[in-house]
Image (cartoon, rainbow, N blue to C red):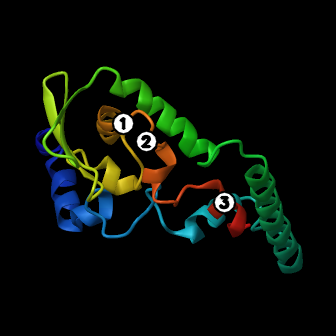
Amino acid sequence: MEKLRNLHLNVYEYVIDAGQHKWSRVHCPDRRYRVMTTNAAECINSCLKFSRQLPMLTLAEFIRNMLQRWFHDRHRAAQFMRHQLTNTVHLVILKRVDKYNFMTVNPVDWNIFSVKLAGKKWTVDLALMTCTCNKFQMDLLLCSLPLAAVRCIIQLYRLDILSLGLYHQTLLRESF
C-alpha cells in the first residue's frame, strides 16, 4: 500500500475510501472460492457482448443454447473426473505440494504448527483451519503451509479430508 501511495496518491485514497472488503479477498466477508467477482450478470454480459444486436427471440434462443451448452459441458467434465477433488483444484494442490518440500515445520502442539520458508514464518492451525498467510481461509483449500504441517504429522493424511468437501467431484456432479 505504501508503494501505491507513493506512485499514485489519488488511486490510494480512492482504494482506501472504497474499503478493503471491496478489493481484497482476504477482507471480503463473502466466500468467493478463488473468484474476484460474484456478479453473474457481469459474466453473462461479457458473453453477450456481440449478440445484443440480435432480435429479442433470437437473443433468447442464443442465451438458452449458451447456458445449455455450459451445463452439458460441465456435467460431462464432472462425469469423467479421476480424482476426489475437481481437476482444477487437484492441479492447484499438486502445485502447492511442490512448494512444501522446501519448508521447515515445527509442531507447537498437535494442531498448531510453525512453518518457515526463506526467512519468513507462518502459523498453521489445522483444528481451526487457519493459516497466517490467509490463503487457507480465502479459498477454503489447503495452501502449501498446511500441506507441510499435514506432512509433518502423518504421511497417510488424505488431501481430500481438509478441502471441506467444497471442491469434491461428487458435489460438482450433483450440481449439474
- Rendered residue at 55%/55% (across/down): 167
Q: Secondary structure at mark 1?
A: loop
Which residue has dot 2 on it? 157
Q: Quadrant of the C terminus?
A: bottom right
Q: Is residue 128 above or below residue 156?
A: below
> The disc labelled 3 sits on which kind of residue?
Thr
Would you say the residues marked 2 and 1 are in contact, meaning their CB atoms lie under 8 Å apart?
yes
Which residue has dot 3 on it? 170
Which residue has dot 1 on it? 154
For marks 1 and 3 on the same chain, the one whose residue lies earlier in the sequence: 1
- Rendered residue at 33%/50% (across/down): 136
Q: Secondary structure at mark 3?
A: helix
Q: Residues within 10 Å of mark 1 (few under 14, many from 20)?
A: few
Q: Splitting the image into 4 quarters, where does residue 100 fall?
A: top left
- Rendered residue at 36%/38% (across/down): 147
Q: Residues within 10 Å of mark 3 (few under 14, many from 20)?
A: some
The answer for how far apart the CA atoms under marks 3 and 2 are is 20 Å
The answer for how far apart the CA atoms under marks 2 and 1 are is 6 Å
> The disc labelled 1 sits on which kind of residue?
Ile
For marks 3 and 2 on the same chain, the one whose residue lies earlier in the sequence: 2
Looking at the picture, tell me which residue is in the foreground, 59 or 144: 144
Q: Nearer the viewer, mark 1 or mark 3?
A: 1
